[in-house]
Image (cartoon, grey):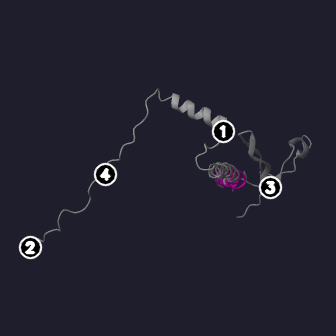
Amino acid sequence: MSRMVNVTKMKNASSTAPPAGHSTAPPHCLHVAYSLQVKGDGRVPCDIAGTVEMPYALHPDGRREAVPNFNKLMELILLRPALMQLTGFVNGLRRADIEARESVAPGEAPPTDERQHHASLASLASLNGAMPEAVDPPLPPNMSPDAPATVLIA
């Protein structure tokens, strides 16, 4: 049994809402209004909002599939786009860091971000003067057979 899903972009909830007491949704419909905004470093790398209707999701014949279908739908319209947008944002920051390091002339100190500098000082202060030592990891156990198996004749 196939189900139809309507997805619309929502700018302002009050402008898209039907008048009070008036419902345009089909019977047994699951109506979802969603919004996700991620902020970081003074920017908004992810801003997703919209509405979705899942007609007949709450119908007695379809209730068993309502939660798994809702989960799949949220992954498709909210989680995946959010992860893609956030990944692009973080990768852009990483590319900018690499370009900044590569653009520094030899013998010149790389430019440091003030926040990065304070974060590194805070992490050093948390060590209480004790610097960790670099040690060689232990060798893995020898798993080779000692000798070929001997054949026993009975």
- Give the crowd class for mark 1: few <14, some 14-19, many >=20 residues within 10 Å: few
Q: Is residue 35 visible?
A: yes
Camera-side residue: 34 or 134? 134
Q: Nearer the viewer, mark 3 or mark 1?
A: 1
Q: Is residue 36 visible?
A: no
What kind of element bears circle 3? Answer: strand
Tell which circle, 3 or 1, labels the residue nearer the N-terminal end: 3
Task: Report the disc number at residue 7.
Answer: 3
Residue 70 inside the magenta-drawn segment: yes
What kind of element bears circle 4? Answer: loop
Q: Amino acid at mark 1?
A: Asp
Residue 103 in percent (x, y) is at 65, 51
Instruction: Please give the range of residues in magenta.
Output: 67-82
Residue under label 4, please give it. Answer: 139
Camera-side residue: 119 or 69? 119
Q: Nearer the viewer, mark 2 or mark 4?
A: 4
The answer to whether 128 appears left or right of 73 in the picture is: left
Residue at image point 75% right, 42% down? 43
**Count of marks overlaid on the render:** 4
Disc 3 and disc 4: Cα gap in Å? Answer: 56 Å
Residue under label 1, please give it. Answer: 113
Disc 4 and disc 1: Cα gap in Å? Answer: 40 Å
Tell which circle, 4 or 1, labels the residue nearer the N-terminal end: 1
Residue at image point 61% right, 45% down? 108
Tell which circle, 3 or 4, labels the residue nearer the N-terminal end: 3
Tell which circle, 1 or 2, labels the residue nearer the N-terminal end: 1
Residue under label 2, please give it. Answer: 153
